[in-house]
Each structure stands twice: as C-alpha cells, then as structure tokens.
Image: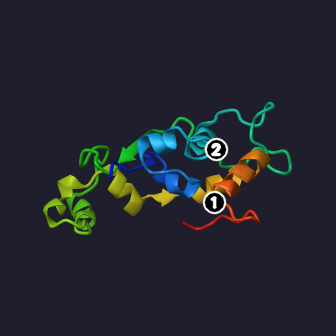
C-alpha cells in the first residue's frame, strides 16, 4: 500500500489532490511528476506571475486569478499515516470524533487519531479543478493533461 498525501493550505482551508492532476498519491509519485501536482503547487505559490516570458497567462494575456493564491501561506503535504491532531490546534475533540467515527477500523475511531489529511478531506475545500482550469491556459500543459487523462479531448476536466 503506502502512505497517501494531499497538499493542504492551513490558512485558506483548501487542498489539492494529486489524483486530479493525473498523479499517484504517494509522495514520490506526485513529487517527481511533470505538469501535474508540482506544477499546480508552483502556480499556487508563485509571486509576481505575469511579468515575463515563461509565466502563466490566460487567453487575454492576463495572469489567471488563482496564480499566487497560496503565496506566503502555511502549506503542508499531509499524509494519511501522519501523527494525529498535529496542525489541528483549536479543533474541538467532538469535531475530531465525528471524523474518527467514519474510520473503517474500529480500533482507530478515536479523536486523537484524526490527522490533517483526514480533517482537510472532510472540512477543507478541494481547489484542484480551479488550478487545472488555470493550467489549461498553457498549450503545452493542456496537451499533457489530455495525454494523461486529466482532460477530455475537448479540453473539459475529467471528473475523478
């Protein structure tokens, strides 16, 4: 099996999901990919996009609104085997227990076993498709996303 990950923004309460970019969920599956999750993360963290060649522009020559959305924020690559309750300061034990109650294995159904991966998937917003929309602005990335099955031949996002 192995550990699965999502990339979480603690400040904006958002995350991106590697599968939606055509990548695997394991750290090195998406960490070594091209034009997938790591490109999405670069777009979200970019500061100063739109001022030079090699930047991401939309069809009107503007920087897509999502570019730089996470610049300066606290970002965690959160694993499903990570320590429980880490990064979850201020979340009530009752709220964590509601998430823990959904765990498959009864012995793990305790609030202290809920980690950022589980919490974010339940409570944060997945912005993967918004980032893919921005990535489609670049012709090379758009064609690559079609090849790996993220986009349909007509350029629409394939729902995963």
Residue closest to the eye, 129 or 11: 129
- Residue beneath the point at 27% across and 44% down: 86
- Residue beneath the point at 66% across and 44% down: 67
In whole angstroms, how far apart are the C-alphas of marks 2 and 1?
12 Å
- Residue beneath the point at 33% across and 57% down: 118
Which quadrant of the view contains residue 124? bottom left
Question: Is 12 situated left or right of 101 in this image?
Answer: right
Question: Is 16 situated left or right of 85 in this image?
Answer: right
Residue lying farthest to the top in this orientation: 52
Count how many numbered circles sit on residues in the image: 2
**N-terminal-most mark, 2 or 1:** 2
Q: Are marks 2 and 1 in contact (CB under 8 Å)?
A: no
Residue closest to the eye, 79 or 90: 79
| Residue 65 horizontal/vertical position (percent) | 70, 49
From this view, report whether residue 85 is shown above or below residue 111: above
The secondary structure type at the circle numbered 1 is loop
The secondary structure type at the circle numbered 2 is loop
Do we see residue 50 in this rendering? yes
Residue lying farthest to the right in this orientation: 60
- How would you rate the neighbour count of disc 1 (Cα within 10 Å): few for under 14, some for 14-19, many for 20 or more? some
Q: Which residue is mark 1?
A: 149
Determine which of the numbered discs, if any, sits on residue 35 in the image.
2
| Residue 147 horizontal/vertical position (percent) | 68, 55
């Amino acid at each position: 099996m192995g550990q699965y990950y999502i990339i979480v923004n603690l400040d904006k309460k958002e995350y991106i999901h590697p599968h939606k970019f055509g990548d695997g969920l394991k750290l090195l599956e998406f960490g070594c990919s091209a034009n997938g999750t790591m490109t999405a993360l670069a777009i979200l963290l970019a500061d100063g996009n739109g001022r030079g060649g090699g930047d991401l522009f939309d069809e009107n020559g503007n920087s897509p609104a999502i570019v730089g959305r996470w610049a300066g924020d606290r970002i965690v690559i959160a694993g499903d085997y990570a320590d429980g309750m880490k990064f979850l300061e201020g979340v009530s034990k009752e709220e964590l227990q509601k998430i823990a109650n959904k765990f498959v294995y009864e012995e793990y159904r305790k609030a202290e076993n809920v980690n950022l991966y589980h919490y974010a998937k339940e409570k944060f917003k997945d912005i993967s498709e918004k980032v893919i929309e921005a990535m489609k602005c670049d012709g090379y990335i758009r064609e690559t996303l079609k090849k790996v099955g993220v986009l349909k031949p007509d350029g629409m996002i394939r729902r995963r």
